[in-house]
Image (cartoon, rainbow, N blue to C red):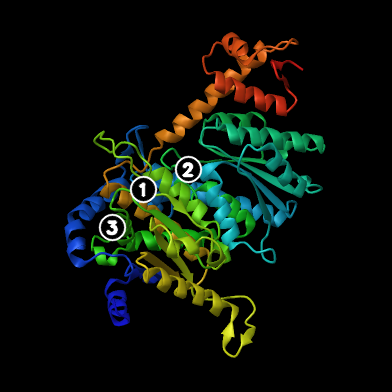
Amino acid sequence: MTQLDHWQRYQKYLSGVPAVDLKLDISRIRFDDAWLAQMEPAIQKAYSAMSALEAGAIANPDEQRMVGHYWLRTPSLAPQPELRAEIESTLSAIREFAARVHQLGAHTDVLSIGIGGSALGPMFVADALGHPATDKMRVHFFDNTDPEGIERVLSGLAGRLDKTLVLVISKSGGTPETYNGMVLAESAFRRAGLNFADHAVAITMPGSKLDRHALDHKWLQRFAMFDWVGGRTSELSAVGLLAAALQGLDIDAILAGASAVDAQTRSTVTAQNPAALLALMWHSATGGKGLKDMVVLPYKDRLLLFSRYLQQLVMESLGKRLDLDGNRVDQGISVYGNKGSTDQHAYVQQLRDGVNNFFMTFLRVLEDGGDPHEFEAGVRAGDYLDGFLLGTREALDGNDRQSITITIPRVDATRVGALIALFERAVGFYASLVNINAYHQPGVEAGKKAAATVLDLQKRILLALAPSVKSVETIAAEAGTESIETVFLILEHLAANRRAKQTPEGFAKI
């Protein structure tokens, strides 16, 4: 294909959201007009499914609930007046609470405790939009149940716990990782001679275990989560907006950016719907069967965590064994990425010359920001960054590697909201194209149940331990399991943490 062909194809297929100056370039995906025409009935069906979703259809039959994250940025679309009131009252409470905290000036830091969607979105937004010179509060995260990781975060707050607000985020209040983080935070506050409740804020469903705990212990504040918002689409609820507001970010601009993209991507004219085109390109690049990975490469440090955020949004939504008709389909699109131009010196070598098992999603930011120093006449640091993006795009295309390019003018609150909304809707459209449910996660639930089984087995193993050494086989039998390997691995962990003694003959109680 000649450069003139590239230019004509770029002009022909360029789409976007003019309201937020977002552009979507799909010209480097190998499709043609005949394929688009062939896919038009399927994407029209996806539009109908999305319209029903926004109107309040039961979209998650496993849990018999609606899926309404789109209402969060346009409450007037909520199908019931009480839902609209819940959204608007929660937003008002977030604004008022953050303003009060800032006005009092008694707190300098925020510790956000959550896992999965209760951490990845808030972490991405905090990093993308925050700046030490302008943040009103510093935000820290417990996003795992790793005790050493938790201790590192607490060490960074040493001497400032008395000025730290703690957000505990869990829909049910029973999420083990979040519960563990809460308990360890409580312990740290207690050691510092502080009353944890005076610093604690719950973000949870009304009436949940966490909500009752916060009420009983007189926590500082409680904010509502909604059963019709899944974790991976919860960033624009209290889950993400409260931490952002406390940090001093413009949450109204984030919501406005998302709402603008939602409005554009409700169009049923495919050429004018960038989310639909994005989903169609995923289908084209992967054969509609996840045959290639999605590499997300933002050429902006502020967007470093976007690929991590998208990993959950895309992979948890689309990674499904069964389709809506109960057929085994093993669907999904693997997502990975870091940032440009760091990756010029890392895995781009394989992308260019190695196995062709991916398609690229470039994120291009036009405004450089920072120091405008010129390294040579007319050449600045940002010119190198943009040059690396454009050069890599050409180099990959020259070796039959496909790519999508999303361009925004700058990384600000409006565009961050726009990017979140664009990918949320693209995921929904793609799920319809391949006939799967994007809004449940049976694999995650299976993993949680398996972990609970292991912890229950560990309790029985501890009871079976004695001062005298026993073989792994004996301990397994006394613990009532045939999973000898699992018993050994649990004992190995206990021994490493001085909770059991390991000898060549077996294990004993310490």
In the current view of this chain or complex, which residue is farthest to the front?
504
Q: Earlier in the sequence, mark 2 or mark 3?
A: 2
**Disc 2 residue type (three-letter):** Gly
Closer to the camera: disc 1 or disc 3? 3
Q: Residues within 10 Å of mark 1 (few under 14, many from 20)?
A: many
Q: Residues within 10 Å of mark 3 (few under 14, many from 20)?
A: some
**In the picture, residue 275 is in which quadrant?**
bottom left
**Position in image of residue 417 (x %, y %):** 47, 60
Closer to the camera: disc 2 or disc 1? 2
Q: Compare residues 43 and 498 and report the one nearer the observer.
A: 498
**From what the image shows, is residue 181 above or below residue 398?**
above
Element assignment for label 1: loop
**Position in image of residue 176 (x %, y %):** 58, 31
Q: Return the residue at label 1.
A: 78
Q: Earlier in the sequence, mark 2 or mark 1?
A: 1
Query: Residue at horizontal 54%, vertical 80%?
Result: 383
**From what the image shows, is residue 169 above or below residue 446?**
below
C-alpha gap between disc 2 and disc 1:
19 Å
Q: Return the residue at label 2.
A: 231
**Disc 1 residue type (three-letter):** Ala
**From what the image shows, is residue 510 above or below residue 136?**
above
Q: Compare residues 497 and 111 and report the one nearer the observer.
A: 497
Q: Quadrant of the N terminus?
A: bottom left
Element assignment for label 3: helix
**In the picture, residue 154 is in which quadrant?**
top right
How many numbered callouts?
A: 3
Q: Is residue 55 visible?
A: no
Q: Return the residue at label 3.
A: 284
C-alpha gap between disc 2 and disc 3:
28 Å
Q: Quadrant of the C terminus?
A: top right
